[in-house]
Image (cartoon, rainbow, N blue to C red):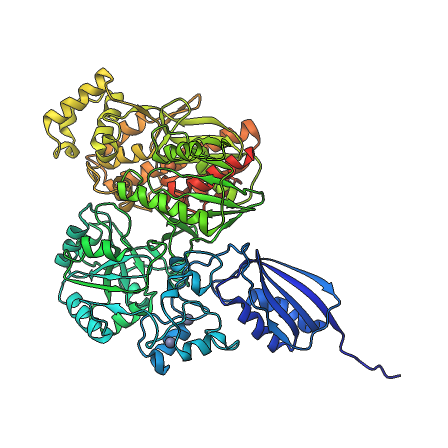
Amino acid sequence: MKFKFTKIKKSVLISIEGLVQGVGFRPFVYRLANKYNLNGNVANRTDGVIVNLYGEEKLIESFKNDIVKFAPPAAFVKNIISENTKSVFVDFKILSSELNEQITEISPDIAVCDDCLHDLKSQNHRINYPFINCTNCGPRFSIVNKIPYDRINTSMADFKMCKTCHEEYHTVLDRRFHAQPVACNNCGPTYIMNGKSDFEKILDELVVKIDSGEVVSVKGLGGYNIICDAKNNDAVLRAREIKGRDGKPFAVMFRNLNAVEKYCKLDSKEKEILKSWQKPIVILEQKLNLASSINYKLNSIGAMLPYLPFHYLMFEKLKTDAVVYTSANISGSPIIADNNLANNTLKNKVDLFVTHNRKIENPLDDSVVKIASNDIQFIRRARGFVPKPVYLNRSVEGVFATGAELKNSFCIGKNSSAILSQYIGDLKDFETYSFYQKAIERYFELFKFKPKLIACDMHPEYLSTGFAEKLNQSDINGNKITIVKVQHHHAHIASCLAENQINEKVIGISFDGTGYGTDGNIWGGEFLVCDTKTFDRYAHFDYVKMPGGDLAVNEPWRMLLSYLDKNSFQDIRSLKCFDSVQNEEIELVYNMIQKGINVPLTSSAGRLFDTVSCLLNLCSKQTFDAEAPMRLESIIDKSENDFYPYIYNNGIINFTETIQAIINDLNTIDISIISAKFHNAIVNIILDVSKRIQKDTAINRVILSGGTFQNKYLLEKSINILTKNNFEIYTNRLVPPNDGGIALGQLVIASNYL
Ligand code: ZN
Ligand code: ZN
Ligand code: FE
């Protein structure tokens, strides 16, 4: 008997949810349908795309597999749902995207792709064109001012496509089909120097300046940048002078991966992130010195690879293989993105000033990440990642979280997505606060957002709290919007709960510098038992006086004096770290401590790390945020397993014995070992208190969040030891553990009141 096989044909409707708009997803679907000989169509939808398919069953399955496997690099497929239909199609079409007001997804900016780098040398109309891009790469969020993401709603609206570009834009199988920023040498944006736009001349002059040790400013993707030779110390010092501030390490852009490997240690995960389409700054361990004033003896470098076509063209001509590449801002203000402002504030300070005529709609800095426990950790979340949402398992529609004060980011809720803004900065800076307000306005408009509920920090003096209250009063409909005030450390833990979609109670360990507590004191070494609704403060670091309040943050010697007073330690002048402090200053601060004048109480982990760093004479005065703990981490002898003692008493962790033991070791043991023993003590405390909570509550999940966990040694060692003791550990991987991630936590906590 013979069987006759007929190929079974069927029809399906596939809904693909995720970040699939403006990243070349529909052309990808088109090519895939062609490959498997399937008919049907693809169209944009509010939360993704829908694909109708008609064809052989087996091939439809292959299609579905490939969708996930081979999706364009910047696309993010969250979910695929397939249902059977009865539709029959005779060809495959990309349906035009109607002006759907509901589509609110915007792709982050994407680093230039390899195909475009190839076209840069081979396509007649794009030879060395510094703004080359395609469906898979190029500017996105930084140029959009309205949704949907169409050319008319971007700063590319100023440029009329030439005939060639127009044709590419409308040809389905072209790499630039519907690439909104498509442009070429004949029709697109240009770089400009002294009113002229001869790019080859600009580039020639630029590289000569950089190679001869001068400092230049060039308009980039999210703002202006300051660039100089990273191996020329005088140049780097001048760049610091121009920025008018502190000793914060500068990021370095390397020519290529080989150059990175020459100066930095690099594991496979770090390599992967460095090369990713987001091209962030990755904090790496230093191997070979660049100019010393890049990081002033810290053992790490913020390294990045070229991400704009312009960067590649620059390195083609540059002799040096490493340049300082830092946001152009003056004294802590936001990155300069406006041409007029740059003209007025920047142009005369640098040796060469290059601008371009594509407007930056949404200013943003380069993102900064590090790898800890083989996972990405955000230090600063901006270019390449914003505004990709964090997907939640609950509705947060209409919730607006105003964020913290330092390292501010805010967050808005759309359906079950949380959209965290780019890094905004320190709101106490006037320019930053006005950037904050403008950015909020822009997000409300871009994402068609109307706040129904506002979340903010509990701190009565935070400008973000003030902003929440102002917004509440200015509701013109007479409807009062509810404000939910969220405790800072609860928000840190909740940000991680949100990322991991955890609703149950956890052990929340929140270590950072400063956060307002429910008792009016400054918290920061906190063990909470909490979920996204409520928290109990199970244990905390013992309170110490903070002489001069905020001044004690900038000057760790003040905190040390406070800790020494607690220890009844008298012989202050025997400690080298006080050499740089005047007698009168010490006396004044000592009196403050004795009399209790202007000495708020703090349980801050950050201040404890500052204290120990100062005691080891690593940092008596900080020239940038978290310098003292960074220097302390930087010297650790990782082979040391010994640790210092501490006292746990009824939920209070006291460091009197710890400080005394360090003083005893000070003249006999190397500070790299002292630093290790101190860090190991903190790790022991984390394990000890977790076990106590576990015993009392049977909770097994531990969340580690807060700025202190940017300390890689502390984080990795804590994760190791907790895992060995069968705890289940969660850390932040989508938003920063520092105050840049606070808004996400505020948002989910407040969403309980919806
Ligand atoms: Zn491309
Ligand atoms: Zn063109
Ligand atoms: Fe914090």
Ligand 2 quadrant assignment: bottom left
Rendered residue at 20%/59% (across/down) = 290
Q: Is residue 733 visible?
A: no
Image x and y of residue 470, in percent: 39, 33
Front-lying residue, 512 or 560: 512
Does 752 sit above or below residue 340?
Answer: above
Image x and y of residue 339, in percent: 25, 58
Q: Quadrant of the N terminus?
A: bottom right
Does 654 sit above or below residue 40?
Answer: above
Of all residues, the one furthest to the front in this rendering is: 477
Left or right relative to 330: residue 426: right
Front-lying residue, 592 or 434: 434
Front-lying residue, 297 or 190: 190
Rendered residue at 17%/48% (across/down) = 244
Q: Quadrant of the C terminus?
A: top right
Image-quadrant location for residue 323: bottom left
Does 421 sit above or below residue 100?
Answer: above
Left or right relative to 406: residue 530: right
Q: Is residue 164 visible?
A: yes
Image-quadrant location for residue 402: top left
Of all residues, the one furthest to the left in this rendering is: 583
Image x and y of residue 424, in percent: 34, 46
